[in-house]
Amino acid sequence: MLVPYTILFLSAALVFVLALVLPSYFRSGLLLLVSYVLYFLSGTKNWYILPLICLIVWAAGLLMEHVTLETTRRVVYLSALFIVLLLFFGFKFASYVPPVAGKLIAPLGLSFFALEAYSYLSDCFHGRICAERNPLYCFLYLSFFPIVTAGPIERAGSLIPQFKELDTMPRRRFIDMDRIADALILIIYGMFVKLVIADRLAILVDHIYGEYYHYGTVSLFIGMIGFGIQLYCDFMGYSFLASGLAQLFGIRIIDNFRAPYLTCSVTDFWRKWHVSLSSWLRDYIYIPLGGNRKGKVRKCLNLMATFAVSGIWHGTGLHYLVWGLLHGAGCVVSNATLKRTKQKLPVGRKLLRALWTFLVVDLFWIFFRADSLRIAFMYILRLFTRPDLWLLSDPSNFLIYGLDLREMCILLIALLVLFAVDLVDDRTGLRLDVWLAGQGKHFRVVFVLLLLFAVILYGEYGAASNPGAFFYASF
Amino acid sequence: MKGPFPEKIRKLCGTRAFEVLVFVLLFAILLNGLSNIFTYKQETKVPRLYNLYDGYDRDTVDVLVVGSSHAAQVSVRDLWSRSGIAAYALISNMQSADTTYYMIREALKYQHPSVIMIETVMMPDNDLHDPDTEYEMDLHADAYFRMSPLYLQMVMDQIRRYGVDMNEGIDLLLKWPGMHMRYGELTEDDFRNTYPYVATEIDWSESFAEDPGAAQMVDTREPISVVGEYYLDKIISLCRKKGIDLFFFHAPYPTSEFATGQQNTIADIAAANNVPFIEFNSLMDETGIDFTTDLCADLNHLNQDGCKKLTAYLAEYLVSHYILEDHRGDARYVNWEKDVRAFDNDRLRQDLNDAESPAEWFDMMMERCGDYMLFLSLDGNYQINDQVPLASWLASLGITQEDYDAGGAFVFDHGTLTWCSGFAEAYVHRVENMPSDTILVRRQNAQIDTDRSNSIYIGETDYSKAINGLNITIYDPFLDEVVDSIGIDVYLGDGILRDKAKYNVD
């Protein structure tokens, strides 16, 4: 997150009030101002990269619009793209270049706003959108504070029209209580999964991964599953928070997670996990490479290439690349072995497939979480060669990972809530706030109050608990 | 119109805005309740803010004693015993001038004392000491305040004063980040004040200083900090505004010349504002305090004897200089009686704990049994060991050989036998009119020798210790507390048990 939660929420509340009081046409300007103030307050190094990319992208878009000669248009497009990618890869791989290693630190959210810049330039060049004349909207698209650090990776075609609409929105609509209350529900649920589940699980996962070399199958399995859920709750929590904050101002952003661990194949998993990145990769890497239009072998190669890019995007270590390739291979295998059918699977079969997918994805996450490829392999080797199933006979054996019985109970109850909410999403296709709307006012009030107090009482925050930053903010 | 409410109201109640309003109201009510539960309560055996919040009747305190550990040398219990002065001490370790000021303001929300006496050793304040330690001590004291606008004001002052960074400052202001992790350590006391009176005061040391030296008395003036002076002025203005008589005192210890000089500066400020100031280092003859006998080994605080002398002087001073009512016997002031009793119980508890044999323990208990309730039970094969003279010890209580042979349980109310189980093989006896549920039980199917057959329940705790032998619990119904509870298990000899008996199976 950009700044501490309290500052963020207080700023959001203040901006909301100002946006309400000031004439409507100031709203986007106000959001841009607060976005840059918060970005600057975050203390990120090389903060100027963000406005620089905004400027390049906006100017290149306008130039492409005005230039009639196709070659010049292409030169402008490729030049701007080159600069964006140079900055992206320059900062990403700086640690491998001895003279600048440790000195050139990537600004916060570079991986995210670079992809947004890429999509804007590409969409302008290919005529999918018109270049934005007003720099305010272009800058705001790339710098909007709820999404600038860790996404979701939005598209200009979706976001900019909403900013424009916001600037003409009547006050009565701006203070639509349904929208505001639903936004608060999203924020509260986001905080619940982040502070109560993800940050609690982080204690367990850090413990196991930190000392994986003296644990056996059972502990390493718990660490593997634990990280899968931790990462999900961490990133999903952020996405809900971002959605809620954006929705507070009437901006609807993409639902980044749709119960991904209840899917039945790796391919389906990527349709519901980090949806904004998956769709970006699909639109700007997979389809330009030919997608599935050039035969089965090419499709497989395209998939592998797309996931390799995904791996590199996440990090420069080899383990990220292997992680990406494993997912590519997982998609290839699941496409080849599982028939897509419109018929609903029987519950038992679906459950089994979902469980299998969950385990496979969790196994792949080991490459994601480990500090290096070697450690990932060592972890997996021990996972499969150090059976210690007798540990299962005594539940007290599971209290050695930094969480005592009380913490474990809190975690398990919170996981039940998470499972229930995901199940609702999977069965009904409705996001939590929308589903709650159909459950009656009393249930909604009680449910949200319980979530809120769970966050206040059992959340991992304050000096004593050393809360972790959002995992994806580090990419 | 349909139903008891007009259509407009029903429509309004159905809106999302109304739902949000209800949500916010419920949230505020629950958060306030939880906040009171989660606020740190301080130890039960020191004067604490929590007792002013929930314990002492409003507007009962006549004298408020405020300050650091040096102020704790004044025994409010002795002030009560000697003169019936209803005093209350608000003490915190190394209490800084700003904490003293805010403590007073917090106390004034609940009490309207006629006199406030402030010990001034920490008044020179901040940069003259170690700021980090002082900040730590301030945070420590802050934790006991309930959330209120005054708390926010106090924290804002500290944030400015110590230059606290943004994150830490927000944590302090919200209070929850610092206290929410208490969900794992909550006790009954957090939900219900289990010691609504002071219980007993800070444990005075009985040590002696080997080479105490003397206070360096000078006439010079040394500067005190800007912060110290600022809050000193604020305290004086506050008391003036509220019509409260204020006086400062500096408890005796071997001060340096510099420290004495600072106290002289405080004395000047006090004089300029017509506030009395007592420098006890100048009153050694009047108080009878002698550092060679009345100072602790830490060379900083008075020991038990010194504290008594200091308190005696202050009691006289209060009575002669202020109009303070003697509240002894007044039902509203029962907490002060309880405080005296708690101290008494504490001393008895220590004596009983120090008893070297059951006979000695019985002798001490017999002297005081008229003040308490006694619950006894003879369990299992209690007669099997002739070496343990249970019958003769119990005879001193008036239990006959016949009653002893019958075994079972006995209840003595202030020295009088009020109930015994006789030969009953099983019983469940509830003692009437007790502050806590008190139940004596004998189970019918207990395996003699190995099973615990009898239990003495007070509240939810079973105080029986011995399996085969005697269990005795001394209980004070006035304070609803157990003074001592022992067992003598004849299988284990005649030693005093304070934990449940365990037999070595090997």
Image (cartoon, coloured by chain):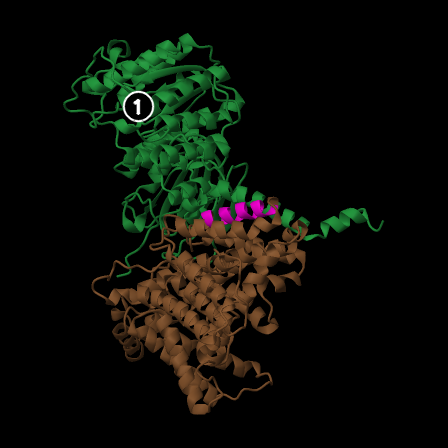
Chain colours: A brown, B green
Q: Residue B318, percent across and down?
A: 40, 12
Q: Residue A451, percent across and down?
A: 53, 56
Task: Please identify the quadrant where the C terminus of chain B is shown.
Answer: bottom left
Q: Residue A90, percent across and down?
A: 31, 66
- Residue at 31% x, 79% y is A384
Residue at mark 1? B225
Q: Is residue B71 in sight in this rendering?
A: no
Q: Residue A193, percent across and down?
A: 48, 60
- B136 over B306 or under it: above or below: below
- B326 over A212 or under it: above or below: above
Q: Is residue B428 in sight in this rendering?
A: yes
- Three-letter amino acid code at the position of disc 1: Ser
Residue A340 shown left or right of residue A213 in the figure: right
In reply to whether residue A14 is colored magenta, the answer given is yes
Please tell me which residue lies in front, B75 or B257: B257
- Locate residue B129: give its quadrant: top left
Task: Report the magenta residues as a range.
Answer: A7-20
- Locate residue B204: give its quadrant: top left
- B174 over B161 or under it: above or below: below
How many callouts does the rendering have?
Answer: 1
Please tell me which residue lies in front, B258 or B350: B258
Q: Chain of mark 1?
A: B
In reply to whether residue A124 is colored magenta, the answer given is no
